[in-house]
């Protein structure tokens, strides 16, 4: 059956959460920021659901499914780029507060669920230097063009709007090589270091119409 990419709806959230959890089960960032011996998948699902709801209101959030099937095979969430010196709007402030308050309520109900809070804030500090995106495809759906369709849904829109695209990967190989095929180039490496236990995040940038510009593009460095 053909794959269809559509905007995330409330009905899609449980499937999107399940896809993200499966795709990130052995992700380097996930293994670094969570204590697997005390990891609570229910708490993690609640947190991801809150973030999905936030992403529906504030980002460009897509899911990929087979035509006529409700199973979510892929998830992609992008945030529109903002200038570093651009002041926060009242809408953004309210949405940040709303996300924070929902997360506080979740933590009161579930606890930390294995989350290493210190490492989480190390990551947040590093992530503040770039504008990131989420892109996941279930292992069983890989090789069917799901990632390409989700990527093109946003990059084609960015080309029309003459907007840059940013993403952050917790794996160098093979992820960055795959993204380079779409016109992304490495823009910097962000190290999250907790007293010697560290991971690297790879920031990538794509200019509008990158396929024709890639040969001449010299990426700006974000982060360290």
Image: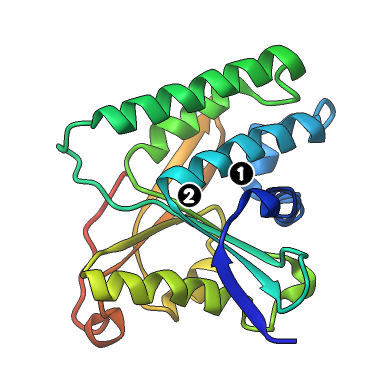
Using the image as rendered, state which of residue 30 and residue 132 is in the foreground.
Answer: 132
**Badge 2: residue crowd in 10 Å (few <14, some 14–19, many ≥20):** many
Q: Residue furthest top?
A: 108
Q: Is residue 10 visible?
A: yes
Q: On screen, 105 above or below 6?
A: above
Compared across the picture, whether 199 is left or right of 139 comes to: left
Q: Are marks 1 and 2 in contact (CB under 8 Å)?
A: yes
Residue at horizontal 27 percent and vertical 75 percent from the top? 159
Residue at horizontal 54 percent and vertical 79 percent from the top? 148
Q: Locate residue 79, reporting x and y percent.
A: 39, 51
Q: CA distance from mark 1 to mark 2?
A: 8 Å
For residue 201, the mark is 2
Secondary structure beneath dot 2 equals strand
Q: Is residue 173 visible?
A: no
Q: Quadrant of residue 102?
A: top right
Give the residue pinned by disc 1: 29
N-terminal of the two: label 1 or label 2?
1
Residue at horizontal 32 percent and vertical 26 percent from the top? 93
């Amino acid at each position: 059956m053909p794959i269809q990419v559509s905007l995330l709806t409330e009905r899609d959230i449980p499937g999107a959460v399940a896809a993200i959890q499966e795709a990130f089960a052995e992700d380097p960032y996930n293994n670094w920021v969570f204590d697997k011996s005390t990891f609570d998948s229910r708490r993690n699902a609640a947190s991801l659901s809150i973030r999905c709801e936030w992403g529906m209101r504030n980002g460009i959030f897509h899911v990929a499914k087979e035509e006529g099937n409700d199973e979510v095979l892929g998830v992609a969430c992008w945030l529109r780029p903002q200038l570093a010196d651009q002041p926060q709007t009242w809408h953004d402030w309210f949405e940040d507060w709303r996300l924070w308050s929902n997360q506080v309520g979740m933590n009161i109900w579930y606890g930390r669920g294995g989350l290493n809070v210190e490492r989480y804030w190390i990551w947040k500090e590093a992530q503040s230097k770039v504008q990131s995106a989420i892109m996941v495809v279930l292992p069983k759906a890989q090789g069917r063009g799901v990632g390409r369709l989700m990527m093109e849904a946003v990059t084609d829109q960015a080309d029309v709007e003459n907007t840059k695209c940013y993403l952050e990967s917790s794996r160098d190989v093979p992820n960055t090589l795959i993204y380079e095929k779409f016109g992304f180039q490495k823009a910097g490496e962000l190290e999250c270091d907790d007293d010697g236990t560290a991971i690297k995040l790879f920031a990538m940038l794509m200019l509008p119409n990158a396929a024709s510009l890639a040969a001449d593009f010299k990426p700006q460095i974000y982060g360290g």
